[in-house]
Image (spheres, rainbow, N blue to C red):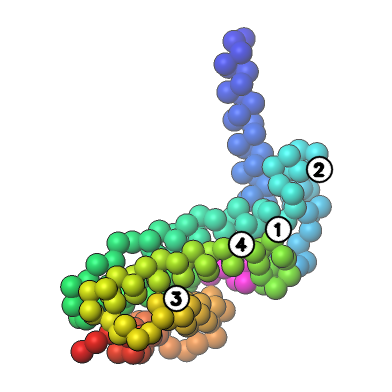
Amino acid sequence: MKKEEITDGRNLRSIATKKRLLEASKELFYENGFEKTTITQIIKKAKTGYGTAYVYFKGKDDILIMLIEDVMQEFLDMASTPFAPSSKKEAEVLIHKQVLLFLNMANNNHKIMKVFSEAIGLSSAVNAKWDEIRETNIHYITKDITYSQSCGLARSDLQANLVARFWFFANENFQWEVVHKTNTASIEEIANTLTAMYVDGLYNM
């Protein structure tokens, strides 16, 4: 057998093992929540050894972070979308679209987001990951506001970074309400209200 074939076989087994661990973790997280799920349960369900599991992950915190990364990348891709409106109305349309995407992504991924929400309060690693995601989003929002201010579309008497933080925290609050199903308003109604308040408060007539 050629060396390349041996290497390819090992890589395929490695990918399969990692996938089993991720799938087992997801099932257990959904069934038991983050706190009650143990790495021992994950390893047994994935039918792998402790030594093998720890080659890929440091623990259940690390596994959850990997599970959530695809979802979080969607959030970051949305936040980094080019924003160059030429009028208040155009800005409102773009912002409304962003809010809808943000809330719908949370809703479509509510099961893993619910686990992630629980873990933020229990794991310093997961909390640090969310802080990283939050600050990256705020960075992109600040850029959008700064652009609008430079074009004379938005009020220049407001500090862009502070407005960006306010805007993200408002969206984040409703994001968790969507995830936990604690708000009776529809996503469209939430997006309409958030957008109207934000645009009317920040943008010039």
- Mark 4 or 1, nearer chain start: 1
| Disc 2 target residue | 50
**Label 2 residue SS:** helix
Q: Is residue 109 found inside the magenta-colored segment of the image?
A: no
Amino acid, disc 2: Tyr
The x and y percentages for residue 193 are 36, 88
Query: Does residue 182 appear anywhere in the picture?
Result: yes
Amino acid, disc 4: Lys
Residues at circles 4 and 2 in contact by the CB criterion of under 8 Å: no
Label 1 Cα neighbours within 10 Å, binned few <14 / some 14-19 / many ≥20: many
| Disc 4 target residue | 129
- Mark 4 or 2, nearer chain start: 2
Q: Up-down: is 5 above or below 110?
A: above
Q: Which residues are magenta?
A: 110-117
**Label 3 residue SS:** helix
Main SS, magenta region, reads helix
Query: Does residue 104 appear anywhere in the picture?
Result: no
Separation of residues labelled 1 and 2 (CA atoms): 16 Å
The x and y percentages for residue 145 are 34, 74
Disc number at residue 184? none
Q: Up-down: is 8 above or below 81?
A: above
Disc number at residue 61? 1
Q: Quadrant of residue 64?
A: bottom right
Front disc: 4 or 1: 4
Q: Quadrant of residue 132?
A: bottom right
**Label 4 residue SS:** helix
